[in-house]
Structure formats: C-alpha cells, structure tokens
Image: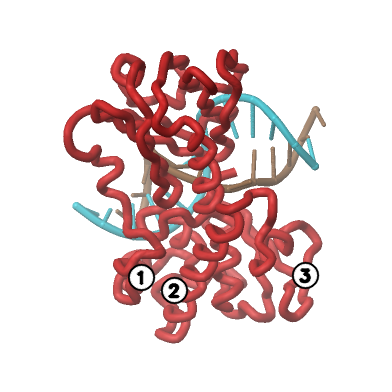
Chain colours: A red, B brown, C cyan
DNA sequence: CAACCTGTTCGCCA
DNA sequence: ATGGCGAACAGGTT
C-alpha cells in the first residue's frame, strides 16, 4: 500500500495515542519484520513510556517515546497502521501492538516486507539521520537531481526513480506518473536525459509528490483527481492526454505503464 | 489453479 | 569500490 502519501496517511492513524502512556507491548520477536532489531530492549523501554511525536520521511516513519526511544516503521508492500479499541487481541498478521488505556496502536503486515527498528539513547539513530533529502526540501536541487541521474547514468530512469537514496517516497505508480508528466520514456538511460528533460523531470517529481501528499495524505479514500496515472495504469486504459493505448512492460523490476506517443524514445529496449 | 502485486535487500557480475 | 540486474522474501488477491 505504501508510497509517500500513504505513509503519511498511516502515520496519522496513531495520532490518537499521542501524549498517552504505553501500558503493554505485544509482539512476536521471531517474525521477519523484526530482523536485526533488539525486541527485548524495545519491549523494556517502550512499556511505561509515552508516545510523544511521529514523523514521516519518504517511506520511513519514526515514532518517538519519552525516555529517548525511537521506533522506526517501514510498511514494505502490505504494511498498515491502525487503531483498535483498548484490550484488542492481535490477529494473525498484527505483529506489533502498543496497548494504551483507551486504545491499541496496531501494526499489521501480512507479507512482512516491512520492518520495525528500535533505538534507545541520546542523539538520533543512523537509520533515521542518514535518510536522503526530501523531495520537498531545498536540498532537492537541480544540481542534486542531475548528479544523481549521472551517477546512475546507465540504468533506465524508471529504475533510478525507484531508488530511495535519491527519491525518497517514490513508488511504482508515482514513478510512472512523474515520467508521464515529464514526457520521458521509462526505459531512457538516466544519463541520456537532456537539460530540458532534467528540468521537466525534477518539476514533475516535485509536483506529483506535493499533489499526492495534499490529497491522499489528507484522505486516503479520495484518489487525487489532478493526477492521471492511478486510474490510467489499470489494464486497458489510455493516455489521458491523447487517448493512445498505454504500453506495459517490466522495467527496473516492476510493471511499468507509459504512453508510447507522448513519451517517445528508447522504448524499444 | 496460476499469475500477479504499491518494496527492499542480497549475491553475482561488470 | 561502485553500479546494475535478477532473485528472494511471504502471503493475499484476481
């Protein structure tokens, strides 16, 4: 489910627990979701602490607790956060539950491609501080973007757009939407983009991120009308601009849809 | 029943 | 050392 805007949507699902004490932590330490994480410390430190703040950056979320605890959550492919009534009994895929007096904060992830991290101490955990510059920030400059494209010059632009080290929060449909707006064929080697295309590319990236956050981040149930692809991507759809049937192929390891007419170029291979 | 899936991460190779 | 690619991960949905 998770891309930039959905992540922000899910982060807010725990807002009801802000400022409130965690009475108990329920988790299955052996689950893949906790790989590399000290779950004993997690349980020990978070139990009895208060949830004080949360932030989303790209596809990463962090929940901070009194006493210097940081809980990092990545939703992977099928992760979701929600709130249940107090005393909630976890179901099969509810891997982490924070019990409060008036509610339970639940993390569910059937496929377990997501991840739970934990840090306790002064300062900031490196998995949070080392994140790439956000697309909405001033650090996401024309120079920064262009340098990133050149560093991956041989890889198709679609694959590069999915690299979280450069475009935090961009997922499969956002990537297709961005390339459609910028009129760039997804198979184009990143280093081949002209100066004009780079400008259009960066502009579209910022626009799609902002629109997705503005609309989906606000109410996930209401798909963004200013964005074309979420609906066009469905099988059998046409380009909203010129009606051409969309092409589909796996690029960068993922299903990719594009308009062969307004995104011309090295679409052949 | 078989194919497909909104995402990382690892191993292999250039 | 860095970059690029394909497989693997695990279960639900179509």
Residue A227's label in the rendered image is none
What element does badge 3 sit on?
Answer: loop
Instruction: Residue A253: tell me if it is visible.
Output: no
Q: Nearer the viewer, residue A90 or A92?
A: A90
Distance between the alpha carbons at the discs numbered 1 and 2? 7 Å
Q: Is residue A124 left or right of residue C4?
A: left
Distance between the alpha carbons at the discs numbered 3 and 1? 30 Å
Instruction: Residue A179: tell me if it is visible.
Output: yes
**Badge 3 vs badge 1, beta-carbon distance below 8 Å:** no
Residue B6: image x %, image y %? 58, 48
Q: Which residue is disc 2 drawn over?
A: A202
Give me the residue at 51% from left, 26% from top: A105
Crowding around mark 1 (Cα neighbors within 10 Å: few <14, some 14 to 19, many 20+) is some
Q: Nearer the viewer, residue A206 or B7?
A: A206
Residue A141: image x %, image y %? 33, 72
**Badge 1 vs badge 2, beta-carbon distance below 8 Å:** yes
- The quadrant of the rendering that contains the C terminus of chain A is bottom right
Among the two numbered marks 3 and 1 on one chain, the one whose residue lies closer to the N terminus: 1
Distance between the alpha carbons at the discs numbered 3 and 2? 25 Å
Give me the residue at 44% from left, 61% from top: A160
What element does badge 2 sit on?
Answer: helix
Chain holding disc 1: A
Q: In the figure, A195 relative to A82: above or below?
A: below
* Residue lying furthest left: A122
Q: Which residue is disc 3 drawn over?
A: A238
Q: In the figure, residue A177 lies in which quadrant?
A: bottom right
Crowding around mark 2 (Cα neighbors within 10 Å: few <14, some 14 to 19, many 20+) is some
Residue A145's label in the rendered image is 1
Chain holding disc 2: A
Give me the residue at 56% from left, 18% from top: A86
């Amino acid at each position: 489910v998770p891309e930039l805007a959905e992540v922000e949507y899910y982060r807010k699902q725990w807002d009801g627990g802000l400022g409130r004490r965690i009475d108990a932590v329920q988790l299955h330490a052996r689950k893949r979701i906790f790989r590399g994480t000290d779950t004993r410390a997690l349980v020990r430190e978070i139990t009895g602490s208060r949830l004080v703040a949360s932030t989303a950056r790209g596809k990463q979320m962090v929940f901070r607790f009194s006493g210097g605890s940081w809980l990092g959550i990545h939703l992977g492919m099928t992760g979701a956060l929600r709130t249940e009534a107090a005393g909630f009994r976890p179901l099969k895929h509810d891997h982490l539950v924070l019990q409060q007096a008036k509610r339970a904060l639940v993390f569910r992830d059937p496929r377990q491609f997501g991840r739970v991290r934990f840090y306790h101490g002064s300062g900031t955990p490196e998995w949070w501080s080392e994140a790439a510059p956000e697309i909405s920030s001033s650090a996401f400059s024309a120079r920064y973007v262009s340098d990133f494209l050149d560093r991956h010059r041989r890889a198709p632009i679609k694959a590069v757009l999915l690299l979280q080290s450069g475009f935090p929060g961009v997922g499969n449909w956002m990537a297709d939407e961005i390339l459609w707006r910028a009129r760039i064929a997804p198979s184009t080697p990143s280093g081949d983009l002209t100066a004009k295309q780079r400008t259009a590319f960066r502009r579209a990236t910022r626009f799609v991120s902002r629109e997705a956050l503005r609309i989906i981040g606000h109410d996930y149930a209401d798909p963004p009308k200013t964005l074309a692809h979420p609906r066009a991507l469905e099988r059998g759809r046409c380009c909203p601009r010129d009606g051409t049937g969309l092409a589909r192929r796996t690029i960068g390891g993922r299903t990719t849809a594009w308009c062969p007419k307004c995104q011309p170029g090295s679409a052949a291979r």
